[in-house]
Image (cartoon, helix red, strand yellow):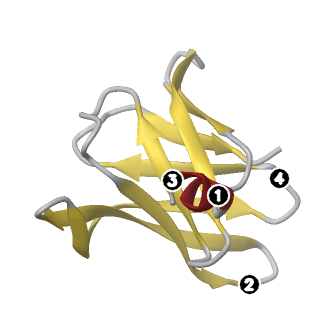
Amino acid sequence: MLAQRQMEFSKKLNLIWLCEETGLRLPAGAAFYNEDHGDYRLKVDLLPEEKILFLKMMSSDEKKTLYRVEVGLKKEGRVIGRVEVGHGESKIGESTIVMDIGPFSKRLVLEIE
């Protein structure tokens, strides 16, 4: 069962903390694309293991794609719902998704390629 569940997710993608004032980039964790649900599961190093974040595409036009960052609400070890905790954006032709997540002052960046 665990092996089957791991097969649903794509290869590991990098998450980076970005300070826009200084340009400093620090490792932040990993992300995995879930093809079945059409979203990314984010594992942010600063958050507890049981805290699950998701990144879901909301809309797109010829210039950019907008995303919503959600936290999974758990009951008895299962995700029973999601609540929005931030937002993200990617410009068409770029290989990053830049996210603002409260309460962090630095931006979280998902490197798609």
In primary-sequence order, the first of circles 2 and 4 is 2
Q: Amino acid at mark 1?
A: Phe
The answer to whether 77 appears left or right of 106 in the picture is left
For the point 43% across and 61% down, which residue is it?
Answer: 54
Residue lying at 83% horizontally and 44% vertically, measured from the top left:
113
Name the mark on residue 9. 1
- The alpha-carbon separation of the residues under discs 2 and 3 comes to 37 Å
Q: Amino acid at mark 2?
A: Asp
Q: Mark 3 = which residue?
A: 2
**Crowd class of label 4 (few under 14; some 14 to 19; many from 20; radius 10 Å):** few
- The residue identified by callout 4 is 94
- In percent of width and height, residue 106 lies at 40, 31
Disc number for residue 61: 2
Q: CA distance from mark 4 to mark 1?
A: 22 Å
First along the sequence among labels 3 and 1? 3
Q: Quadrant of residue 33?
A: bottom right
What is the CA distance from the residue labelled 3 to the residue labelled 1? 12 Å
Label 3 or label 4, whichever comes before in sequence order: 3
- Marks 3 and 4, how far apart at CA: 34 Å
Residue drawn at 67 percent across, 72 percent down: 35
Q: Is residue 26 left or right of residue 36?
A: left
Q: Nearer the viewer, mark 2 or mark 3?
A: 3
Instruction: State how far apart marks 1 and 2 are (Cα).
Output: 26 Å
Q: For numbered disc 4, what is the local secondary structure?
A: loop
State yes or no: discs 2 and 4 in contact (Cβ < 8 Å): no
Residue type at numbered disc 3: Leu
Secondary structure under the numbered disc 2 in the rendered image: loop
